[in-house]
Image (tube, rainbow, N blue to C red):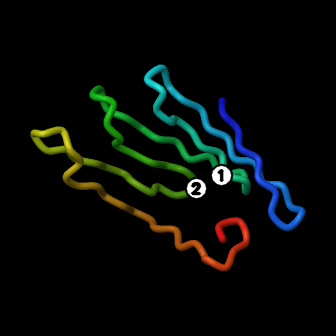
Amino acid sequence: MRKFRQTINSNSYLTQWTYNKADQPVTMTYPDGEIVTTGYNNLMQLVSLIGKSTYVSTSAYDSALEQSNASIETITVIDPRDPLFG
């Protein structure tokens, strides 16, 4: 598990990641407690991204093994004025 702690305006925020044996991110825990899980196919290509919402439900790849399509179910808009992301 890898951790990153950042302090903004005296508030401490912790983000954590877990990885598989191929060093690909499997989970990411955001400071608000949301855990986002990344799913991969047998070729280790991203196929899903699921947390409080389903962010990516399917993903397709072309013959060159490049991502050609992804179904994005939910998009989270971040306020750029939020001090956590500013």
- The image position of residue 75, as x and y in percent, is 46, 67
The residues bearing labels 2 and 1 have C-alpha atoms spaced at a distance of 6 Å
Q: Amino acid at mark 2?
A: Lys
Residue marked by disc 2: 52
In the displayed image of the protein, which residue is found farthest to the right?
Answer: 10
Callout 2–callout 1 Cβ contact below 8 Å: yes
Element carrying mark 1: loop
In the displayed image of the protein, which residue is found farthest to the top?
Answer: 21
User: Residue at coordinates 65% horizontally, 67% vertically from top-left?
Assistant: 85
**76 in relation to 31, above or below:** below
- The image position of residue 38, as x and y in percent, is 46, 41
User: Of label 2 and label 1, which has the lower sequence position?
Assistant: 1
In the displayed image of the protein, which residue is found farthest to the left?
Answer: 63
Judging depth in this view, the residue of 7 and 43 nearest the camera is 7
Residue marked by disc 1: 34
**69 in relation to 65, above or below:** below
Give the mark toward the camera: 2 or 1: 1
Q: Amino acid at mark 1?
A: Glu
User: Residue at coordinates 62% horizontally, 38% vertically from top-left?
Assistant: 17
User: Residue at coordinates 58% horizontally, 55% vertically from top-left?
Assistant: 52
Q: Residues within 10 Å of mark 2 (few under 14, many from 20)?
A: few
